[in-house]
Image (tube, rainbow, N blue to C red):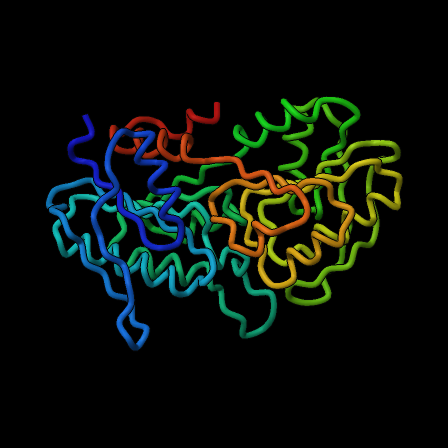
Amino acid sequence: MLERMRIFSGNANKKLAEDICAKLGISLGKANVATFSDGETRVEINENVRGMDVFIVQSTCPPVNDHIMELLILIDAMKRASADRVTAVIPYYGYARQDRKVAPRAPISAKLVADLITTAGANRVMSMDLHAGQIQGFFNIPVDNLFATPIILKYLMKNFSENLVIVSPDTGGAERARAFARRLNAALAIIDKRREGPNESQVMNIIGNVQGKRVIILDDMIDTAGTMVQAAAALEAAGAVEVVACCSHAVLSGPAIDRIDGSNIKEVIVTDTIPLHERARQCKKQITVLPVAGLLSEAVRRIYYNDSVSSLFI
């Protein structure tokens, strides 16, 4: 039934692409994505895609710029090979935090990346838990922003059921935390913080009661883990008895693992939109990775058949 569907992958997260294909009962498309000796990206499509509905699975995780170029060149290759439709499946959308001008003469890099993807020839984009919802408006093509909420909620309901507080590490994530708290019948708390510079933050105050509670800090991503670790320390000082960190995208760059190792965080819950790098797999704390292939494969199937994607979350 999926004879006109082809799924390809760059080098960012080939395992996730293979898992999506396994869920759909098809084989991963044959493509060679490598580099020339000078570092330029080289792409060869080794099967016919003429008239096909092509999905390219590629998170823009570190090394971000290399993976973005792989995605752009793959899209271009598919269009020049006469693919009927090309959908860029970007589980983690890099540059999403640069979604507005925060200073004079600053770029809006999230918009630039959107323009690059569109210009390369993508007909549609699928992503997961965009850092800023307005990024959907940066594209002039359809965008499906999926949510890892059902996957994460299922795990939390099974393992955390009593004496629970859901904590947003900043005011921007309060809506997300409130939705989780409502579904888990838990209380809500918010960290009031002041960001001093890129990848730096200072916890200022806790809004809500965490005394004697198990707390789950909920965010869309963990990058250098500075915010998460400072929040965990502040929550413990305020009387929390257990602190767990939870996010969709485990970027875990720079000093992230060292910070988590030295923190009071008991467990880190993430999804596999980004593959764990070797240093993360050596983390002393428990890192639980939840698979998203089931959700992504169902969304791919619905796009292929022109069914509703939003009904996945009703």
Is residue 18 shown above or below 201?
above
Quadrant in the picture for the N terminus: top left
The quarter of the displayed image where residue 91 is located: top left
Q: Where is residue 220 in the image (x, y as percent from the top left)?
A: 58, 45
Is residue 39 shown above or below 289?
below
Q: Residue at position x 41%, y 35% from top?
A: 293
Q: Is residue 120 visible?
A: no
Q: Residue at position x 47%, y 64% from top?
A: 109
Is residue 12 shown above or below 151?
below
Q: Where is residue 2 in the image (x, y as percent from the top left)?
A: 20, 30
Left or right of 283: which side holds 123? left
Q: Residue at position x 70%, y 50% from top?
A: 228
Q: Where is residue 224 in the image (x, y as percent from the top left)?
A: 63, 58
State the residue lying farthest toward the bottom: 38
Q: Can residue 106 be seen in this view?
A: yes
Left or right of 17: which side holds 164? right
User: 195 or 77, which is in the foreground?
Assistant: 77
* Tally of marks: 0
Left or right of 42: which side holds 135? right
Q: Residue at position x 22%, y 58% from top?
A: 76
Q: Where is residue 267 in the image (x, y as percent from the top left)?
A: 68, 40
The quarter of the displayed image where residue 297 is located: top left
